[in-house]
Amino acid sequence: MIDIHELLAFLWKDYLAITPQAARVHTVLEARGEIIVNDHIALRTFDLPAVGIEVLARPFLACGYEPRDDYEFPDKKLVARYYQHADPALPKVFVSELEVGKCSPLLQRIVAELVGAAGAGAPDRPIRQDGPDWPDGPPLVTAGRPWPLSFATYEQLLGESEYAAWVAAFGFRANHFTVDTGALRTFASLSELNELLLASGFELNASGGLIKGSPADLLEQSSTLADEVEVAFTGERHRIRSCYYEFARRYPGESGELFHGFIATSADKIFESTDIRR
Ligand code: NI
């Protein structure tokens, strides 16, 4: 059986490799004596049978995670589901997928070709070689980009769906991790943390305001703007937006229990952290 801690550690290492700012955020927080707790990780995919939400979530279900709420993002043609583990120390897992059938015939054709070519070679995956010895073979969520991709195709996708372009370029891996700011001891509020991040030189996603959601929603979120990294495309390399870091503050509901779900209108804006032009 997959060891959930090994899987999460693998995804974290892989995320850091294309999100160098996440390590810098840790340095800033740890300098204040903070211990960082992860609220959730987010995964992205296409809604095709071979790679859909349920396939991506399989190793988490095998480790005892259970599906919770579903969400819809009609403007972005996305749906999502989150999974939670009985062990509160384990992060929630938020998995979204693009509803490919609602996209243009061109996008549908490109995505079908990519998924059909999965396993045909992934030149950007040296990190995969030193992963754990997965008992039943590596789960899809650790695959990275399992298909070749030309920069022209990436740009075609980008013209229609930033989300589709991101999945095409980066494949299966964590899109972001999330600092549980309720577990931080030296910040009275999420805005205090945002102030420190801005003062430390990080750029934050301002779409919908720096803080998405409110205490009345039981969830406040903010995020950095995605890093830019060099990615190998067929025959050339280009710098493109990779991943961002998120910060979440949760509040207790009427029952007194902490709210563990998500707010669709906030998540809709957070998705744009990989999109916003600097
Ligand atoms: Ni998130």
Image (tube, rainbow, N blue to C red):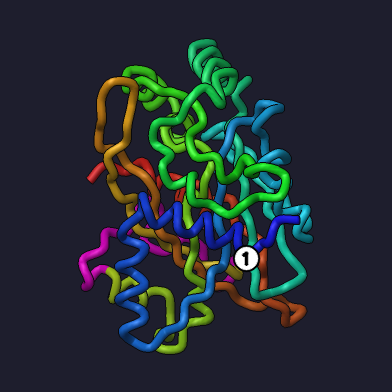
Q: Is residue 129 visible?
A: yes
Q: Residue at x 36, y 49 (%)?
A: 18
- Would you say the magenta stretch is mainly helix, strand or loop? loop
Q: Which residues are magenta?
A: 198-217
Q: Which residue is tagged 1?
A: 5
Observer-nearest of 130 and 38: 130
| On screen, residue 116 above or below 136 | above
Seen at 26% across and 30% down, the residue is 237
Q: Residue at x 27, y 59 (%)?
A: 203
Q: Position of residue 164 (x, y in %)?
A: 48, 30
Along the line of sight, which residue is nearer the eye, 17 or 209? 17
Amino acid at pointer 1: His
Q: Is residue 213 magenta?
A: yes
The residue lying at 43 percent from left, 80 percent from top is 189
Q: Is residue 68 visible?
A: no
Neighbour tally class for label 1: few under 14, some 14-19, many 20 plus, Cα within 10 Å: few
Judge left or right: residue 56 versus residue 31.
right
Q: Is residue 215 magenta?
A: yes
Q: Quadrant of residue 34?
A: bottom left
Of the pair 246 and 12, the residue shown nearer to us: 12
Q: Picture coordinates of residue 161 (x, y %)? A: 45, 29
**Image position, residue 1 (x, y; %):** 76, 56
